[in-house]
Image (spheres, rainbow, N blue to C red):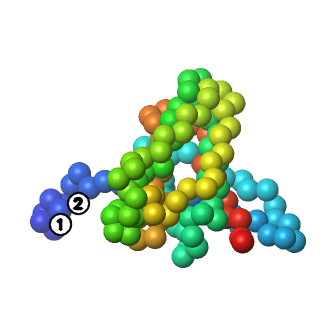
Amino acid sequence: SHHHQFLTKGATMARTAVTVETLSRTGATSPTGTTADPTNDHSVDLGGYPLEEFIFRFTNTNGSDRVATIVAGDNPPAMSAGQGNLDITVPATSGDMTVAGLESARFIQNDGTVSIDLAASFAGKVYAIRVPR
């Protein structure tokens, strides 16, 4: 209907999910990652596990340094969201940056996900790796 078109016009695209790959004591294939999508950005579903068990890795094949941003969460539940976003500069061409030790209290969204924004022209992959305790 015409009304429906009005409601959806200009709606933001859904974020592209990053596949979570879980390591184990018995071995797991090395993570393959999710192709970077700087147009829609990314969301990681933590599956109810604490963010502290996750490692995020970013590779950049663009010819310039590009920034990946771990977005501050909703408050609540992210009581430390006021500390703001975390920007990770991923070097040009063959950049490979890995981040761990992120606090749920700063970055968790109210739907249990983590949002990752990528700078325009970011090219490469985004990895979400869970290391069980």
Q: How far apart are the two marked residues, 2 and 1, measured between alpha carbons?
A: 6 Å
Disc 2 marks which residue?
A: 8
Answer with left or right where residue 124 lies relative to residue 113.
right
Q: Position of residue 5 (x, y in %)?
A: 18, 61
Disc 1 marks which residue?
A: 4
**Up-down relation of residue 98 to residue 66 (above or below):** below
Name the outermost residue toward the top: 63
Identify which residue is drawn at 65% across, 27% down: 93
Q: Amino acid at mark 1?
A: His
On the image, which quarter does residue 128 sit in? Answer: bottom right
Q: Position of residue 115 (x, y in %)?
A: 45, 56
Q: Nearer the viewer, residue 87 or 68?
A: 87
Identify which residue is drawn at 72% across, 71% down: 133
Q: Residues within 10 Å of mark 2 (few under 14, many from 20)?
A: few
On the image, which quarter does residue 91 sit in? Answer: top right
Q: Is residue 13 visible?
A: yes
Q: Position of residue 59 (x, y in %)?
A: 65, 40
